[in-house]
Image: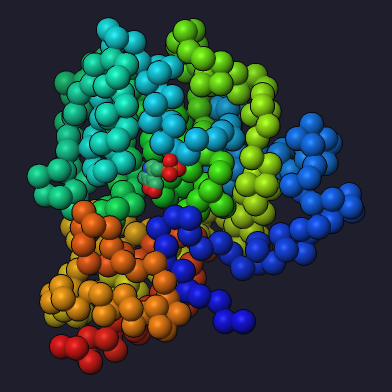
Amino acid sequence: MERTTNFNAGPAALPLDVLQKAQKEFVNFNDTGMSVMELSHRSTEYDAVHQKAKSLLKELMDIPDDYDILFLQGGASLQFSMLPMNFLTPEQTAHFIVTGAWSEKALAEAKLFGNTSVTATSADSNHNHIPEADLSGIKDGAYLHITSNNTIFGTQWKEFPNSTIPLVADMSSDILSRKIDVKTFDVIYGGAQKNLGPSGVTVVIMKKSWLENENANVPKMLKYSTHTKADSLYNTPPTFAIYMLSLVLEWLAENGGVEAAERRNQEKADVLYGTIDASGGFYAGHAAKDSRSHMNVTFTLRDSSLTKKFVEEAKAAKMTGLGGHRSVGGCRASIYNAVSLADCEKLAQFMRKFQQENE
Ligand SMILES: Cc1ncc(COP(=O)(O)O)c(C=O)c1O
């Protein structure tokens, strides 16, 4: 069977090796005579999976000992609410750098719990760049929230802001795609369904000392301390998604870890942006060059009436997920860790051929 080249924004491509390993173990996990999905989350067999996922993530991201690693549910979207619910009081202010629709959603949730302030925004240019942010005025505040990679608009922070208040990052669409210094952040969170595995599990990496500020008046399931105390096993976790996460992390470790992934992602992005830039305006990138995402390549066609044809012909050539989000239009190729350089070269070749035939 020929696999489809998958440029979906999320859920997204998973490494074929991972899918095949999961398939092999599907009905008989580790000689238990059961699928991993059938194991009790309190069993030693499942615990080994849970601990493996945690320790691989810790190793790959070089997460210091004074951070907790949590596997939660509710997607990154629940983090938009849980963070202010736990860490923003009505007297305090949470600061936001708004770089797209997901930052806006995080901001809207924080407004329900306390004061908010927009430190910088790229809204007036349809979020085509990462704005300069003057942080000198921010002396206090509950936290500063950023979105490290803007999945819809295709922009990405290259250097993180130097914040004197706790820095919180939604890294849903670029976690593990490049080396970052975890110590820069008090909280990092992301849904798994782009670089980490299937949907259903959300990874939260949180500085232990930050938990001391947690609001006591929050329902138990929505409190971080409930989950840190129980090692993310307070209630039934999404065991299959965590198992898949452990396989993806294992695959990444076997393929050179984050540094090698970063190099591959740079090469992949260069292939696609190079094709856009060499097209003489037939294709135009949405993001300003210095803000270009290495995960989501957004572009429009000079003649927008050709967009549908482009997506359809790509699909006929077994490349899927290339339709852009309605707020940008045009096309988007999401090239997460599991998308290979050869996949990007195949798309670039298609783009050149499409241009020749339609210019
Ligand atoms: C940057 C970013 N944040 C948050 C979300 C929402 O994630 P979830 O669907 O896991 O709630 C997405 C989804 O695509 C995203 O790309």
Q: Vertically, is 261 above or below 236?
A: below
The image quadrant in which ligand 1 is located: top left
Residue furthest out toward the bottom: 357
Question: Whole-percent x and y of residue 68?
Answer: 58, 27
Question: Whole-percent x and y of residue 31?
Answer: 89, 53
Classify the position of the C terminus by image quarter.
bottom left
Q: Vertically, is 263 above or below 233?
A: below
Q: Viewer-proximal residue, 204 or 200? A: 200
Residue 290 visible? The answer is no
Please give the name of the residue rendered at 41% of the width and 36% of the height, measured from the top-left corner: 77
Question: Taking 124 as reference, is 13 left or right?
Answer: right
Question: Taking 74 as reference, is 104 left or right?
Answer: left
Please give the name of the residue rendered at 56% of the width and 41% of the height, measured from the top-left corner: 201
Quadrant in the picture for residue 23: bottom right
Please give the name of the residue rendered at 62% of the width and 55% of the height, measured from the top-left corner: 248
Q: Vertically, is 138 above or below 326?
A: above
Residue 72 visible? The answer is yes
Question: Taking 101 as reference, is 316 left or right?
Answer: right
